[in-house]
Image (tube, grey):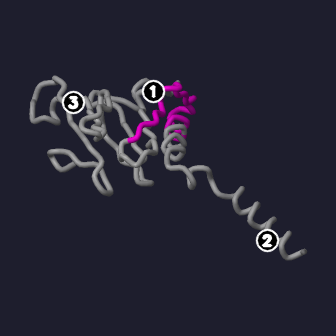
Amino acid sequence: MFKSWTVLFMTATLSLALPASAAEPADAVIDKAQQDCRSFENGVFAMTDRAVSLVDLTGDGKAEKIIDARHFSCSSAASLFCGTGGCMLTIIAGGKPTEFLAKGWKVVQWNGQAILLLAVHGSACGGTNLRQCFKAVVWSEDGFRSLDGE
């Protein structure tokens, strides 16, 4: 009896010692943004309820988390999370984060396949002007794929 209580106590203590980000990659992304904000002139981090979206991108019937830094803010830095190239979009799929730089995004369905459309800076499409262009990304096997291989 004593042995089982000891094991239970040790298990509970160990689980409390683990950081939340170890269990959830999306939490790690948000924690890092909070730390980045705090480290710049002790800023105060905030995010809207639109910062995290749930969308099935892999076709397995379970929603992936999409963390859109466009909905983050820091009191001490107006452009900490976004710039002229866009904002960081982090997608947790297959248990790992994948990052894209985007000015906006939308998911469309085509023949049962979820396609992530990214509005990207014009330079990503070979242009020298600042016009937008778009990139289509799909989940395939163990990662995201697009026409340009990225």
Q: In this view, does 44 lie to the left or right of 55?
A: right
> Which residue appears at 55% of the width and 36% of the height?
38
Residue most extreme to the right: 1
Q: Mark 3 points at which residue?
A: 121
Residues marked 2 and 3 touching at CB (< 8 Å): no
Q: In this view, does 81 lie above or below 140?
A: above
Q: Whole-percent x and y of residue 60?
A: 40, 49
Compare residues 16 and 46 and report the one nearer the observer: 16
Whole-percent x and y of residue 99?
A: 35, 44
Q: Mark 2 points at which residue?
A: 7
Magenta span has 106? no
Q: Nearer the viewer, mark 2 or mark 1?
A: 2
Q: Earlier in the sequence, mark 3 or mark 1?
A: 1
Three-letter code for the amino acid on which mark 3 is drawn: His
Q: Position of residue 17 (x, y in %)?
A: 69, 58
Which of the two discs, 2 and 1, labels the residue nearer the N terminus? Answer: 2
The residues colored magenta run: 35-56
Circle on res. 71:
1
Gap in angstroms between the C-alphas marked 2 and 3 = 55 Å
Amino acid residing under circle 1 = His
Q: In this view, does 125 lie to the left or right of 143?
A: left
78 sits to left or right of 127: right
Residue shown at 50% from the left, 49% from the top: 25
Q: Which residue lies furthest to the left in this view?
A: 127
